[in-house]
Image: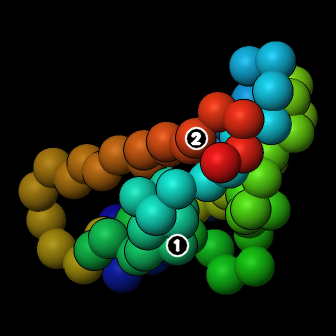
Amino acid sequence: MIGQVSATQTFTITNGGGVPAAAQQGYHRSLWSDTGDFKVVAGSTNCTGTLAAAAPCSVAVTFNPTGPGLKSTSLSVSATPGGT
């Protein structure tokens, strides 16, 4: 419903590579930016800096529609293998 915040949805991101991966600029923007009706829950993410090999991190998101119609968004992750 318009103006009602959804239940929190938590997404887990795992570094499937064999080496640490350092978050790039786009990674931080994607995780920390609020995009319209979808919001990253403040303080909900531990996806910062370098993610160790095989390590997970998570981010929580809510949906709060401000008007009628279909809504969509995406969460993109990119990193530099080897932590450079």
Picture residue at 49% right of the left edge, 42% below the top? 78
Q: Is residue 66 visible?
A: yes
Of 26 and 32, nearer the camera is: 26
Pair 2/1: label in front: 2
Q: Neighbour class for label 2 at 10 Å: few (<14), some, many (≥20)?
A: few
Q: Position of residue 16 (x, y in %)?
A: 74, 19
Picture residue at 52% right of the left edge, 72% below the top? 32
Of 57 and 27, nearer the camera is: 27
Amino acid of disc 2? Thr
Pointer 1 residue: 32
Relative to 69, residue 39 above or below: below
| Dot 2: element | strand
| Quarter holding residue 34 | bottom left
Q: Position of residue 38 (x, y in %)?
A: 40, 66
Picture residue at 65% right of the left edge, 48% below the top? 84
Q: Position of residue 7 (x, y in %)?
A: 63, 59
17 sits to left or right of 81: right
Pointer 2 residue: 80
Quarter holding the N terminus is bottom left
Q: CA distance from mark 2 to mark 1?
A: 18 Å
Q: Is residue 63 visible?
A: no
Relative to 2, residue 68 above or below: above
Q: Neighbour class for label 1 at 10 Å: few (<14), some, many (≥20)?
A: some
User: Which tag, 2 or 1, sits closer to the chain's start?
Assistant: 1
Amino acid of disc 1? Trp
> Residue lying farthest front?
84
Picture residue at 50% right of the left edge, 43% below the top? 77
Relative to 57, residue 68 above or below: below
